[in-house]
Image (cartoon, helix red, strand yellow):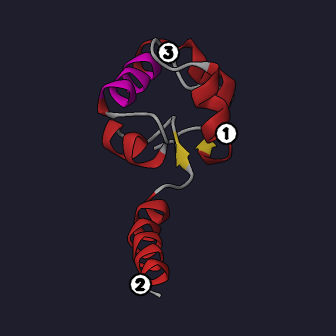
Amino acid sequence: MIKLMSRFFMVAMLVPCLALAGPVNVNTADAETISESLQGVGLNKARAIVEYRQKHGPFKSADDLSLVKGIGDRTVELNRENILVAPAAKK
C-alpha cells in the first residue's frame, strides 16, 4: 500500500510539469516561452531560435527549426505537435 501511495504521489507531482508544455508559436514567442514549452530546448537553444528567426525571417514549417544550430531532427520530432509556425500579427 505504501508503494502504491508513493507512486501516486510521484505521478501527481509530475502532472503540473506536463501541463506547462504546450503549443508555442516559434515565430512570435520569446526565448523563455519557447524553452518552457518544448522538451529538450533549454534557454540557450531557445535564444538561438529567436536569433535565427530575427536574422532569417519567420519559420515556414516545424522542420525549419532543424536549421538552428543545436536543434536536431530528433528535437523537432519530439515536439512536432507543440510547434506552431503561424505568422506574426501585423500592426
Q: Position of residue 86 (x, y in %)?
A: 62, 41
Query: Going from the N terminus, do you reach mark 3 or mark 2 first?
Result: 2
Number of the front mark, 3 or 2: 2
- Residue that sits furthest to the bottom in the current view: 1
Question: Which residue position is annotated with label 2?
Answer: 2
Characterize the local packing of mark 2: few (<14), some (14-19) or many (20 or more) Cα atoms within 10 angstroms.
few
Q: Residue 20 carries which label?
A: none
Identified at 44% across, 83% down, the residue is 5
Q: Do the residues labelled 3 and 2 touch (CB within 8 Å)?
A: no
Identified at 41% across, 61% down, the residue is 17
On the question of residue 85 being in view, the answer is: no
Query: Going from the N terminus, do you reach mark 1 or mark 2 first?
Result: 2
Q: Where is residue 72 in the image (x, y as percent from the top left)?
A: 57, 18
Q: Which amino acid does label 2 sit on?
A: Ile
Q: Quadrant of residue 43?
A: top left
Q: Where is residue 49 in the image (x, y as percent from the top left)?
A: 43, 24
Question: Which residue position is annotated with label 1?
Answer: 80
Q: Do the residues labelled 3 and 1 touch (CB within 8 Å)?
A: no
Please say if 83 is above or below 76.
below
Q: Is mark 1 on a helix, strand or loop?
A: helix
On the question of residue 53 being in view, the answer is: yes
Question: Which residue position is annotated with label 3?
Answer: 68
Q: Is the magenta stretch mostly helix, strand or loop?
A: helix
Q: Is mark 3 on a helix, strand or loop?
A: loop
State the extent of the magenta-drawn residues as a range.
Answer: 44-53
**Residue 2 placement, left or right of 44:** right
Query: Going from the N terminus, do you reach mark 3 or mark 1 first?
Result: 3
Identified at 52% across, 47% down, the residue is 24
Characterize the local packing of mark 3: few (<14), some (14-19) or many (20 or more) Cα atoms within 10 angstroms.
some
Q: Which amino acid does label 3 sit on?
A: Val
Identified at 47% across, 88% down, the residue is 1
Disc 3 to disc 1, how far (Cα)? 15 Å
